[in-house]
Amino acid sequence: MRTLISIGAVISSFIFFMIAHSAVAGEPSVAIGSDAPDFRLVDQNGDWHELDDYRGGWLAIYFYPKDDTPGCTAEACAFRDNIFAFRKIGAKIVGISVDDAASHKAFAEKYGLPFSLLADTNGETASRYGVLSNRSMAKRQTFLIDPSGRIAKHYDRVDADTHSEEVLADLKELQSATAM
C-alpha cells in the first residue's frame, strides 16, 4: 500500500511539474477571438508601450528569437520594407524578443527599423502569449490584434523571408471582412 501511495505521489508531482513547466516554456497558446494578453514593455528608445496604446487600430506583434541574427534580420527588414503599406491600411508593427533595449537600439539603428522593438527581458510577455521556448528565447510567431484588443490571427509557423507579405495580405482581408 505504501508503495502505491509513493508512486501516486511521484506521478502527481510529475504532472504538476509538467503543467508548471509548460506554462513557463510557453507551450499554451492564446486562442483566436480571446483578449490579447496585456503587456508593459520598454522599446529601443526607452519609451514604454502597453497593449492599450494600440486600441482602435490593427496591430501585428511579431515575436522573434534574437536581434541581429540572419532569420530575425530578414524578418525585421521585410517588415521595414513594407512599412508604408502597413501604414496605409492603418496597421502598426511591434517586434518583441527577450533581448534588452540596448540590443534593440543597436539592431534598429543598424537596419533602419521604423517600428518599436520591445524588450521582454524576463520573458513574461512571451510566456503569456505562449511563445517562450525552453531556452528562454521567444519563438518566431506573430499575432494580429484587432482594434478591440482581441487575437484575430496567430501564425505559429513563420517563414522570415515572406512573412511580412503574408501578414499584410491577411490584415487587408481581415479589415475588409470586418467592414462588411
Image (spheres, rainbow, N blue to C red):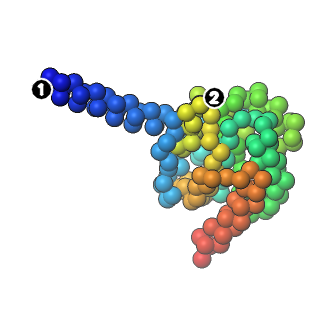
Amino acid carrying mark 2 in the image: Thr
Q: Is residue 110 in view? A: yes
Which quarter of the figure has residue 121? top right
Image x and y of residue 70, in percent: 79, 41
Nearest the eye: 124 or 19: 19
Q: Is residue 175 in view? A: no
Residue 64, above or below 60: above
Q: Residue furthest bottom?
A: 180
Residue that appears at 14% across and 22% down: 2
In the rendered image, which residue does mark 1 sit on?
1
Residue that appears at 63% across and 67% down: 174
Image x and y of residue 59, in percent: 66, 53
Q: Quadrant of the C terminus?
A: bottom right
**Apparent side of residue 25 relative to residue 19 in the rendered image (left or right):** right
Q: Earlier in the sequence, mark 1 or mark 2?
A: 1
What is the secondary structure assignment of the residue under circle 2?
loop
Cα distance in 3D space between marks 1 and 2: 48 Å
Q: Quadrant of the N terminus?
A: top left
Nearest the eye: 6 or 13: 6
Residue that appears at 67% across and 65% down: 170
**Apparent side of residue 45 relative to residue 58 in the rendered image (left or right):** right
In the rendered image, which residue does mark 2 sit on?
121
Image x and y of residue 58, in percent: 65, 57
Nearest the eye: 33 or 52: 33
Which quarter of the figure has residue 119? top right
**Apparent side of residue 112 relative to residue 177 in the rendered image (left or right):** right
